[in-house]
């Protein structure tokens, strides 16, 4: 017997294929359309198809697996269920329980956006807010299950859930034959597992490719280690796939049946959200656009044959509207349609005009400057690109040949998320300063908790925060006269993920007062 509990891969595929074919998901789910993406297809020179799971009643594929599991529990005599989720799984369980006349309790972190809490309550579930993250909510949900004798509905590590999600592939292959590759978003791995089991049973020549956020690549880590391992922390931008450890069952199926797992950046995800809007006039949540972002990375590889047929799963569209501000800012950089630079120019009349002349008419998307020195000025400048990486390299050559010292900040996370929005300048006197990037839970007492933990151990010398409509916020904070040991202890006590970013070039250029070294 293998680690998956089956004598062979063929036995495993046969088992899940039968469960997928018998899953009664269409008591609640709808068969979703496949939409061609004409503009993106022309750009990539491949036929790109989008499986629109945002057409489901809860705007997400999660309804399929949740209903299959809840319906099985009802047949076993269960009359109440509980789950933990801050997103689409919560709505799937609530919707399924309502349709089957069952009581449902959904435990959600206190940081959950009100729009999601309201959506679950409107579906008839009892919402319990507990903890500041998924792990604490999940622990409490299991406690409630024991205390109230309810059945726990897992989000991905369950055969019935996996089989329900596999019906996406059943529909897709009935709608579109001869697909060269199917791209599937990966969080806990349930959708990838179910779809891989069906595709490799029916069309084994079709590649099954998982896509993960680079900062939440738990399946990539599991495949490298040959077993599911827990990541110390995950990025939260694509919150629908922000899972520290993939399920054991999804891992076994992915290891046996998945051809590849691709990771993509947040900027690439934002660019995919824009592509979906441009072609389909639909607004995907970040996790919903994840598969398309991976498709684009795969299609642009030099070794990829021309004119293949690809399908990507638009897995969900439960997006807080105010997150669009962040997505629109980052999509241009993710698609290499904008570049950011720190440039040193002379502090003299006509200097800015000469700089623009050197750029040869290129569109300046952003220009930030503040007087700081009688001889030189540091400018933060954004440039519109139409030729991608080749044009970016051309701009760099132009600046070098014109004698400008510069730093390319296009991949500098601090520059993109904070520096471009900050005003002020460098300190008038030297500071022994440490700069940290901190992830804050979005609840009313988060800042007070932070300041209480800080107490009198260090002085805040810089602070920047901008809300992006997520359950977590990102804060850039500077501390003067604070040792790394003190900061480490403070953040560990708070359980706030953080990293020291004092060496970032954008910080040295614009905020630290240190002498920056340009390339």
Image (cartoon, helix red, strand yellow):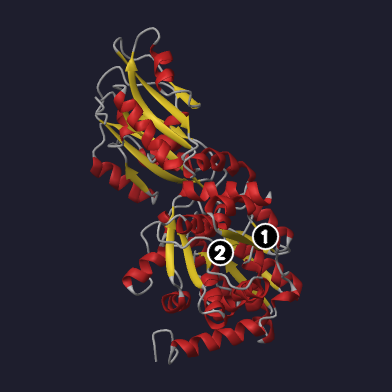
Up/down of 51 relative to 351, above or below: below
Depth check, front residue: 346 or 91: 346
Name the image quarter holding the C terminus: top left
State the image coordinates of residue 313 (x, y, percent, origin top left): 59, 63
Residue at 24%, 22% in the rendered image: 430
Depth check, front residue: 198 or 215: 198
Q: Secondary structure at mark 2?
A: strand
Depth check, front residue: 428 or 213: 213
Can residue 165 be seen in the rendering of this structure? yes
Q: Which residue is mark 2?
A: 310
Q: Quadrant of residue 233?
A: bottom left
Q: Is residue 322 left or right of residue 368?
A: right
Disc 1 to disc 2, C-alpha distance: 12 Å
State the image coordinates of residue 66 (x, y, percent, origin top left): 63, 72
Can residue 409 be seen in the rendering of this structure? no
Residue at 48%, 26% in the rendered image: 362
Q: Which mark is residue 125?
A: none
Q: Which residue is mark 1?
A: 35
State the image coordinates of residue 126 (x, y, percent, origin top left): 67, 63
Q: Residue furthest top?
A: 349
């Amino acid at each position: 017997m293998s680690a998956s509990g089956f004598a062979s891969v063929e036995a495993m595929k046969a088992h899940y294929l039968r469960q997928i074919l018998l899953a009664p998901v269409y008591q609640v789910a709808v068969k979703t359309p496949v939409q061609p993406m004409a503009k993106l297809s022309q750009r990539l020179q491949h036929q790109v198809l989008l499986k629109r799971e945002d057409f489901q009643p809860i705007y997400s594929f999660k309804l399929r697996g949740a209903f299959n599991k809840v319906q099985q529990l009802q047949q076993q005599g269960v009359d109440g269920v509980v789950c933990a989720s801050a997103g689409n799984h919560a709505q799937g369980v609530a919707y399924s329980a309502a349709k089957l006349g069952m009581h449902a309790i959904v435990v959600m972190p206190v940081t959950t956006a009100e729009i999601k809490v309201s959506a679950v309550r409107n579906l008839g579930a009892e919402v319990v807010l507990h903890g500041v993250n998924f792990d604490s909510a999940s622990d409490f949900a299991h406690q409630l299950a024991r205390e109230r004798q309810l059945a726990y509905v897992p989000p991905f590590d369950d055969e019935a859930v996996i089989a329900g999600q596999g019906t996406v592939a059943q529909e897709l292959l009935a709608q579109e034959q001869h697909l060269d590759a199917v791209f599937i978003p990966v969080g806990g791995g349930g959708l990838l597992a179910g779809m891989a089991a069906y595709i490799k049973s029916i069309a084994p020549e079709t590649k099954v490719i998982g896509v993960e956020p680079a900062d939440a690549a738990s399946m990539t880590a599991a495949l490298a280690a040959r077993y599911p391992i827990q990541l110390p922390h995950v990025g939260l931008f694509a919150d629908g796939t922000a899972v520290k450890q993939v399920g054991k069952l999804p891992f076994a199926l992915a290891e046996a049946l998945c051809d590849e797992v691709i990771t993509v950046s947040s900027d690439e995800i934002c660019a995919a959200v824009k592509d979906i809007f441009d072609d389909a006039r639909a607004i995907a949540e970040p996790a919903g656009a994840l598969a398309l972002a991976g498709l684009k990375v795969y299609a642009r590889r030099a070794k990829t044959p021309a004119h293949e047929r690809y399908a990507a799963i638009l897995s969900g569209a439960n997006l807080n509207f105010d997150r669009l501000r962040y997505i629109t800012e980052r999509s241009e950089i993710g698609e290499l349609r904008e570049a950011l630079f720190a440039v040193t120019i002379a502090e003299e009349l006509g200097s800015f005009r000469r700089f623009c002349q050197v750029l040869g008419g290129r569109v300046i998307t952003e220009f930030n400057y503040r007087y700081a020195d009688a001889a030189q000025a540091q400018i933060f400048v954004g440039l519109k690109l139409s030729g991608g990486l080749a044009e970016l390299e051309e701009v760099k050559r132009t600046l070098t040949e014109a004698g400008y010292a510069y730093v390319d900040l296009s991949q500098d996370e601090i520059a993109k998320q904070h520096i471009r929005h900050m005003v002020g300048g460098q300190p008038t006197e030297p500071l022994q300063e440490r700069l940290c990037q901190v992830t804050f839970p979005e609840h009313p007492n988060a800042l007070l908790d932070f300041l209480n933990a800080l107490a009198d151990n260090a002085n805040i010398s810089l602070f920047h925060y901008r809300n992006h409509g997520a359950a977590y916020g990102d804060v850039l904070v500077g501390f003067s006269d604070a040792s790394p040991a003190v900061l480490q202890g403070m953040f560990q006590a708070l359980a706030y993920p953080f990293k020291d970013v004092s060496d970032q070039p954008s910080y040295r250029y614009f905020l630290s007062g240190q002498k920056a070294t340009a390339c």
